[in-house]
Image (cartoon, coloured by chain):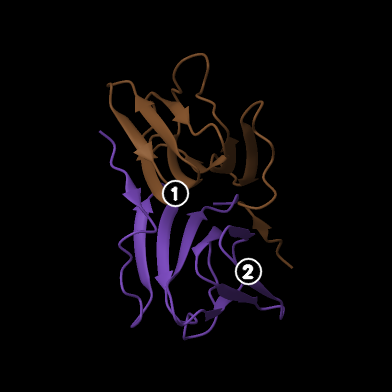
Chain colours: A brown, B purple
Amino acid sequence: MIEVINLLRGLPDAANGEVFERLAGVNGVMIERIVSQGQSSPESGWYDQPNHEWVMLLEGAARLAFEDGSEVELAPGDALDIPAHTCHRVSWTVPDRPTVWLAVHYPAADG
Amino acid sequence: MIEVINLLRGLPDAANGEVFERLAGVNGVMIERIVSQGQSSPESGWYDQPNHEWVMLLEGAARLAFEDGSEVELAPGDALDIPAHTCHRVSWTVPDRPTVWLAVHYPAADG
């Protein structure tokens, strides 16, 4: 019997730090849930990733900023495909309730 | 500027057939949204897929059946990882409103 999990119930407490949970994947594909609460990330600067990342906001509210100066505001159901090496960061998440992300990291075409 | 789409707004009418929309992917990875309304599928029998499929119910209600006789009932937020060649079918979706699925197809470890 295949296990069913619910990504929106029984959320971990992210008030003191984002919580990353790997859900599935193999061969460079990684599906994860991220729970944020008020964080912007990474603290150190930009995410510059070798893989593509498709991301969807499941719950909450957030803003993503890109190195070209653009910023997008995300509501539940919003999704975007971030190409490899497109520098980005979470510039804001709503402070008073959890924000839940689904991220699918997948290899770029050239490996 | 990266395009943001919303997977829950402006849904296609699926009353006369499921609507599959490819969202992203490359190299055997395929992220898609499926909108169902009352369908069970496939009509022809079982899905027997060469790739793994991670699936999440975003909206609506559905049941998935497996060849071993087990069946799971899915509510929004529910997710499961269906290994390659695990025969399955959608045995029911709620008839009076859309059911929205997110599916991530990804290659099995042996290619």
Q: For residue A76, which numbered disc appears in the image?
A: 1
Determine whether, in the image, residue A50 is placed left or right of residue A15.
left
Residue A95: % across, % down: 54, 31
Residue A36: % across, % down: 57, 34
Q: Residue at x 66, y 53 (%)?
A: A9
Count of numbered marks: 2
User: Closer to the camera, A82 or B76?
Assistant: B76
State whether residue B85 is above or below residue B8.
below
Q: In the rendered structure, are the residues bearing label 1 and label 2 in contact, judged by CB atoms less than 8 Å apart?
A: no
Residue type (three-letter) at the residue carrying disc 1: Pro
Spatial distance from mark 1 to mark 2, Cα to Cα? 31 Å
For the C terminus of chain A, give its image quadrant. Answer: top left
Label 2 residue SS? loop
Residue A40: % across, % down: 50, 24
Residue at the bottom extreme, as displayed? B44
Determine whether, in the image, residue A25 is placed left or right of residue A78.
right
Q: Which of the two marks, 1 or 2, is nearer to us in this view?
A: 1
Residue type (three-letter) at the residue carrying disc 2: Thr
Q: For residue B86, which numbered disc appears in the image?
A: 2
- Residue B30 seen by the camera: yes
For the N terminus of chain A, give its image quadrant. Answer: bottom right
Q: Residue at x 45, y 28 (%)?
A: A92
Label 1 residue SS? loop
